[in-house]
Image: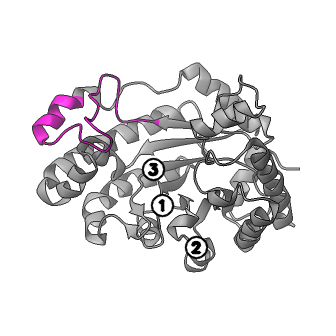
Amino acid sequence: MLTHRERFVRVLSFEPVDRLPVIEWAGWWDKTVARWHGEGLSPSLTDAYEIRRHFGLDPVQQMWIPGIGPGTPGPTRHGGAIVTSAADYQEVRRFLYPDGLPVAEETLRAWAEEQRRDDLVFWISVEGHFWFPRRLLGIEGHLYAFYDQPALMHAINEDLLRFNLDVIDRVCAIIQPDFMTFAEDMSYNHGPMLSRNQFEEFIAPYYRETVPKLKRAGIRVFVDSDGDVSTLVPWLEEVGVEGMLPLERMAGVDVTQLRRDHPDLRMIGAFDKTVMHRGEERIRQEFERLTPVMRSGGYVPSCDHQTPPEVSLDDYRLYVRLLREYAERAAQ
């Protein structure tokens, strides 16, 4: 019988397994967990790792590595700007790209020991070169900056590149990530929010520097983007990205077609979160939709985003039971 980590690594290598991983890659909405506490989940269970253990899911631990440090001014509104000019950026830059890691070294070493026992899948997330300028410039300002402030966009992404390369070295000195994600959210439900030319000018050069280093370290490279990523995938593959998540069904993502078009693409997610509270028959229908891709290798089925608060504790237990059933069935 394979260990949790062996199973995960083998699936992403398109190798046979005794069953597919049974994971929840994302944490849960706070409103979802609050509902479950009211339905009998122990109030002491608040940490995502411990909640995974409670439900019998395979252990997964993520470390998010932010480029924004303590003391950074916040935007004036949701989606608003922190900086609007190169001068603003230089003023705020002293708060960005924090030294050290967001998790204590002794915690990382404990995770590394658990990983060495093959009982833990460990992954990191760094802020990507579409995502991070948007955090600084705001949603609207960021889109204008492709045209109005290209030098500032490149200055931010050059600094982010150096920060990410350095932090990858520091993490790998302690623990080996099994995979990683660039947080990007470059698409919405009609496709990418930038053109191919903009991607090539403002995003691709920084991936071409970072991705080879990640691969040399033995880390599978994923991009996390909501929305319909069908058009985006070939752009990312050209710069060395190996996988995508969460593959949102409501945005029109068809993982069966993605597998046909991109046979080497690794995928995590794709289970339509909007059916999780609709009973066993509907959940089974969704797993039947995904089963051919589950059998094709390179794919770990999981919720296509965080479990919504419409899902009761009993609903989620049913979902996990059926996820395990189909994970075993797909490997036979």
Q: CA distance from mark 1 to mark 3?
A: 10 Å
Q: Are marks 3 and 2 in contact (CB under 8 Å)?
A: no
**Discs 3/2, front:** 2
Marks 3 and 2, Cα distance to the nearest angstrom? 21 Å
Between 155 and 231, which is closer to the camera in this rendering? 231
Residue at x 65%, y 28% (from the top left corner): 46
For the residues bearing labels 1 and 3, Cβ distance under 8 angstroms: yes
Question: Which residue is pictured at 69% across the width and 48% down the height?
Answer: 311
Q: Is residue 3 visible?
A: yes
Residue 227 part of the magenta-drawn span? no
Question: Does residue 187 lie above or below 2 as drawn?
Answer: below
* Picture quadrant where residue 11 is located: bottom right
Say which label, 2 or 1, has the lower sequence index: 1
Q: Is residue 119 left or right of residue 185?
A: right
Residue drawn where x is 16% and y is 42% of the image: 84
Q: How is the image coloured?
A: one colour
On the image, numbered disc 3 is attached to which residue? 182
Q: Nearer the viewer, residue 227 or 129?
A: 227
Comes first in the chain, label 1 or label 3: 3
Q: What residue is drawn where x is 71% and y is 54%?
A: 277
Considering the numbered disc 3 on the image, is that residue within a helix, a strand or a loop?
strand
Residue segment shown in magenta: 65-93
Q: Is residue 319 left or right of residue 253?
A: right
Q: What residue type is disc 2 on?
A: Asp
To which residue does mark 1 refer?
A: 241
Q: Please, is residue 134 above or below residue 327 in the view?
A: above
Residue that mark 2 sits on: 254
